[in-house]
Image (cartoon, grey):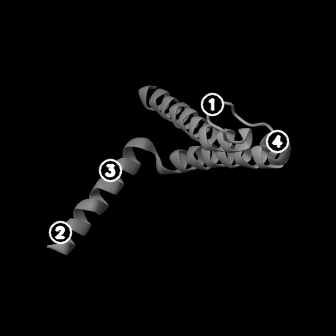
Amino acid sequence: MPNQTIAQLTAAALAFERRFGGERLKRGMLAMFAGWIAFFLLVNVFIRPLNRLVMPFLDLPVGVVLVAQGTVVVFVVTLYLLAKKYDASTAA
C-alpha cells in the first residue's frame, strides 16, 4: 500500500512539473521569497523609530503592526503576481 501511494505521488509531481515547468516555477518562487525577505529586513531597519509611535485603538507599536500585517500583504500580492505570470505563460 505505501509503495502504491509513493508511486501515485511521484506521478502527480511529474505531471505537475510537465504542465507548469519546474525551473520557471522555482525561479519565480525564489524571487517572491527574496521580495518578502527584503520587505521584512527594511521594516526591521526602521523598527526602533517606528516603535516610538503607538496605534491609538490597538495600543500596539506601529512597527509591530507593520510587520504583522505588511508581511502578509506583501506575501499575498507576490503570490498573486506569481500566479498571474504563470497563468499567462501557460495560456501562450
Of the two numbered discs 2 and 1 on the same chain, state the one appearing first in sequence: 2
Of the two numbered discs 1 and 3 on the same chain, state the one appearing first in sequence: 3
Q: Residue drawn 54% across and 50% down?
A: 26
Q: Amino acid at mark 3?
A: Ala
Q: Amino acid at mark 4?
A: Arg
* Position of residue 58 in the picture relative to residue 6 (left or right): right
The answer to whether the residue labelled 4 contacts the one labelled 1, judged by CB atoms less than 8 Å apart, is no
How far is disc 4 from disc 1 in space, using C-alphas?
Answer: 15 Å
How far is disc 1 from disc 3 in space, using C-alphas?
Answer: 50 Å
- Residue placed most toward the observer, 40 or 11: 40
How far is disc 2 from disc 3 in space, using C-alphas?
Answer: 17 Å
Of the two numbered discs 4 and 1 on the same chain, state the one appearing first in sequence: 4
Q: Residue drawn 40% across and 50% down?
A: 17
Near mark 1 (Cα within 10 A), the count class, few <14, some 14-19 or many ≥20, is: few
- Residue placed most toward the observer, 49 or 1: 49
What element does badge 4 sit on? loop
Q: Which mark is residue 52?
A: 4
* Position of residue 15 in the picture relative to residue 40 (left or right): left
The answer to whether the residue labelled 2 contacts the one labelled 1, judged by CB atoms less than 8 Å apart, is no
Of the two numbered discs 4 and 2 on the same chain, state the one appearing first in sequence: 2
How far is disc 4 from disc 2 in space, using C-alphas?
Answer: 58 Å
How far is disc 3 from disc 4 in space, using C-alphas?
Answer: 52 Å
Q: Amino acid at mark 1?
A: Phe
- The residue where tag 3 is placed is 15
Q: Position of residue 19 (x, y in %)?
A: 38, 43
